[in-house]
Image (cartoon, coloured by chain):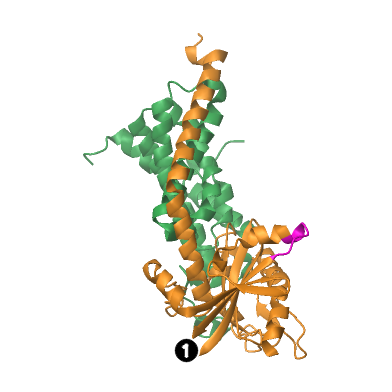
Amino acid sequence: MSKKTDSNSYTMIFAIGMVLVVGSLLAFLASSLKPNISENKRIEKQQNILYAMGVNENDESSAIFVSTSVAEQEFQKYIKKQLVIEGDNFSEDDKAYMIDVKKEKSKAKNGGTRKLPLFVGEKDGKTFYIAPIRGKGLWDAIWGYVAMDENMIVQGAYFDHKGETPGLGANIKYRFFMDDFKGEHLLDASGNFKGIRVAKGNNDPKNDEKTDYEVDAIAGATITGDGVSAMIKSDLKLYVDYFKTLKQ
Amino acid sequence: MGLLSKKDAKLITDPLTDNNPITIQVLGICSALAITAELKASIVMSVSVLFVLGLGNVVISLMRNIIPSKIRIIVQLIVVATLVIIVDLVLKAFAYELSKTLSVFVGLIITNCIIMGRFEAFALGNGPWKSFLDGVGNSLGYAVILIIVGFFRELLGSGTLLGIQVLGDPIEKTGLYAFGYENNGFMLLSPMALIVVGLIIWVQRSRNQALIEEN
């Protein structure tokens, strides 16, 4: 017995119809929700930057941002300057936080000059320099913001990821990992850039040693950890020249 | 239970025990291995699957008479993917925090073989209400195993439950760690999830001999 749903023409028509319906439904949803989504992303960036410089609502163990409703005000209040570094020049731009690090990275790869955003924040009389970093984890992109003082000593860090394994690589956005970076040095005694390595078998699990250029890795997240080391090394290195000008 | 007939109730209770999707049908193993290093991730994944499978089963069941049999697998895949993407978009727009937590799971839900398996085996041949119950039952069966595995992997692997240190502090050497106990890092790796699932299957089959296949 042949059903009408078995015929080739019915199958074709069904397939075309389904693609049209599903395609337009998703396209409609995506474009109508786009303003909301990009606004959420913008506020998240502000929250991330503030988090790195220590403006957050952290309780004892978990990482909590300032609430979305006050993020904009807090950002205006704490971030004094937003710099864009292009080669040897730097200029101020109050939309620097919207610079797409991913695009700038691929621009640099194709021989262009990369725009490097740097945010200068002030809290309790202390100045923070916050730089965005971006790299690859195990499955997808990882990124973060690192707050430093003028000697490139890390004052705070925030990491995030697109699709690392929950419970393993995804743990880079937990306090126990991010807080380990506080106080770590990026430069050696003579001012050369060393970076911070996410190290397995670290002899210093309590992280008392701040000049070993290492933090303790997460078990089961080797590749994500290596990705964090790599993005710190490649991206923060680009700021060394700027930090030298601060000393002059 | 007045709400469900005996037959309908069986649709929910069967997958919890004698027809469990993971331990008996051996579906959804991939996600059971991937995300059970932490109890919280297991719970989030279970709730997401409950939602998608319940809804997807109903949609497929409503469409069951018009889906051309030659391309039914593709149609099923499109239905799951569409549902998941819609949920993801809406969450991104209105509950951004929640969507950040879930975003990692989106890919895992679409490729979860329990979902395709239930569409194919049940929703294509049954009415919407029954399909809904089947979806709920199977995702609960999935949830039970995920949560058991997640519980043991997090407890033995990290010494925590839902992120709270229940065995003491491994670095400060308090609690159990003061007596020389160490976390078993092996438990955090995926193969150990397979072993835990294997142990569950062993326990289940030794309690119910009827589940053992004859060779």
Residue A64, placed above or below residue A102: below
Please tell me which residue lies in front, A96 or B43. Answer: A96
Q: Which chain is the one coloured orange?
A: A
- The amino acid sitting under disc 1 is Asp
| Magenta span contains residue B136 | no
State left or right for residue B209 relative to residue B171: left
Q: Is residue B27 visible?
A: no
Image coords of residue B135 (percent x, y):
41, 39
Please tell me which residue lies in front, A78 or A227. Answer: A78
> What element does badge 1 sit on?
loop
Which range of residues does the magenta coloring cover?
A: A108-114
Image coords of residue B189 (percent x, y):
63, 62
Residue A120, placed above or below residue B43: below
Q: Residue at x 60, y 56 (%)?
A: B195
Q: Residues within 10 Å of mark 1 (few under 14, many from 20)?
A: few
State left or right for residue B51 relative to residue B37: left
Chain at tag 1: A
Q: Residue at x 72, y 79 (%)?
A: A240
Image coords of residue B17 (percent x, y):
43, 45
Image coords of residue B93 (percent x, y):
42, 53
Task: Report the number of discs.
Answer: 1
In the rendered image, which quarter contains the C terminus of chain A?
bottom right
Q: Look at the magenta stretch and give its main secondary structure.
A: loop
Q: Is residue A192 visible?
A: yes
Residue occupying the far left of the picture: B2
Q: Which chain is the one coloured green?
A: B
Q: Which residue is identified by label 1? A: A124
